Amino acid sequence: MSEELMDVWNVEIKTSFDVNNIIYEKKVLITIKNHSPYVRKFEVGTKYINIKDQYEALKFRIRYNLTSPVVISIDKYRKETIEVLIPKVNHHLGEILYFMWKNLDKNEEKEIQYNL
């Protein structure tokens, strides 16, 4: 009797305030776990940034380190962590980031909203 192999992946997000820099206020750790017996290629990026004040949005985008998507390969049964630094700006209630992950091998996409 043959068993079907599980081909699953998931994403975890953790916030850390352990940033020793005057430009950044916190960092977001994005961990992608590949529970698959195959090497998978993922694209990680920011889908949408919602900051109402144009000056603060410009400051944010200049210092933000995930402006273009990152493509990584994750070996079978492994995980990778991407560190995203969040710049210090004057935040208002309701301002959010949308992170996006795409499994390029299976054409699956996930996204999550992160409150600033």
Image: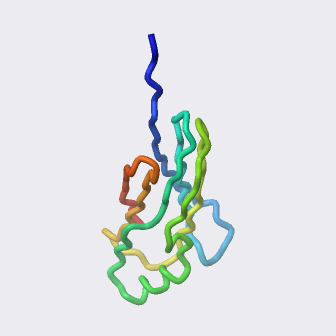
User: Could you tell me which quadrant the C terminus lies in?
Assistant: bottom left
Image x and y of residue 3, in percent: 45, 18
Furthest residue in direction right, as rendered? 20
Furthest residue in direction front, as rendered? 1
**Observer-nearest of 45 and 18:** 45
Q: How many marks?
A: 0
**Observer-nearest of 58 and 39:** 39
Q: Residue at x 48, y 47 (%)?
A: 12
Q: Quadrant of residue 79?
A: top right
**Observer-nearest of 15 and 82:** 82
Horizontally, is 74 left or right of 42 in the view?
right
Q: Residue at x 53, y 75 (%)?
A: 64
Q: Quadrant of residue 16?
A: bottom right
Q: Residue at x 63, y 60 (%)?
A: 18
Q: Is 110 placed above or below 6 here?
A: below
Q: Quadrant of residue 55?
A: bottom left
Image x and y of residue 50, in percent: 34, 74
Furthest residue in direction bottom, as rendered? 55
Image x and y of residue 15, in percent: 52, 55
Image x and y of residue 103, in percent: 45, 51
**Observer-nearest of 103 and 98:** 103
User: Could you tell me which quadrant the N terminus lies in?
Assistant: top left
Horizontally, is 92 left or right of 11 in the view?
left
Q: Residue at x 53, y 41 (%)?
A: 34
Q: Is 65 placed above or below 2 here?
A: below
